[in-house]
Image (cartoon, grey):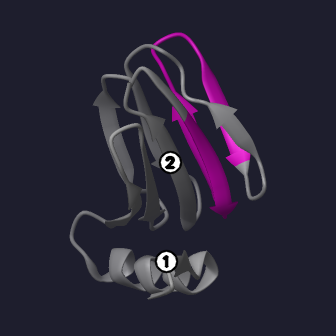
Amino acid sequence: MTENGIVSVESLAAELLEEARGHHSKRAARTLVSGTAQRATLIALSAGAEMSEHDAPTAATLQLLRGTARLHTRNQEWVLAAGQLVAVPPQRHGLTAVTDAVALLTVALR
């Protein structure tokens, strides 16, 4: 997966998507970077998979790398396609895979 700290995101995305397709939750994730100030996590969801509503971190972005997914709060939603990035809303939110999807979640920890 890594060589000298460099991650092949494309290869890992394919691996995680295969893992998600075979898992009962239809999800798989791997933390790529973890430190005191930030965390980057690659999340794969097979079509129809959901991450139910959960609290928002202080600051985060979600970049869709593959497929289509819907980020939503009670009052708003964003349908993301591959190559699009959005700031995660500062309230409870959820994520649903419209198609097989892979996203990179980057979170500021302080």
Location of mark 1 (residue): 5
Location of residue 46 with respect to 88 vertically, above or below: below
Judged from the image, the secondary structure of the residue bearing numbered disc 2 is: strand
Residue reaching furthest to the top = 75
Q: Residue at x 48, y 19 (%)?
A: 73
Question: Of tags 1 and 2, which is closer to the observer?
Answer: 1
* Left or right for 99, reference 34: right
Residue nearest the viewer, comparing 9 with 84? 9
Q: Residues within 10 Å of mark 1 (few under 14, many from 20)?
A: few
Q: Which mark is residue 105?
A: 2
Decide whether residue 63 is among the magenta residues: yes
- Image coordinates of residue 36 in percent, x first then y, are 33, 41
| Picture coordinates of residue 71, whole percent (x, y) | 55, 35
* x, y percent for residue 19: 34, 82
Q: Is residue 62 above or below residue 110?
A: below
- Which residue shows up at 59% across the image and 62% down it? 99
Vertical relation: 5 (above or below) 76: below
What secondary structure is marked by label 1?
A: loop
Residue in the image at 56% along x and 57% along y: 103
Residue 84 percent location from the top left of the image: 76, 47
Q: Nearer the viewer, residue 25 or 57?
A: 57
Residue 90 appears left or right of 49:
right
Q: Which residues are magenta?
A: 61-80
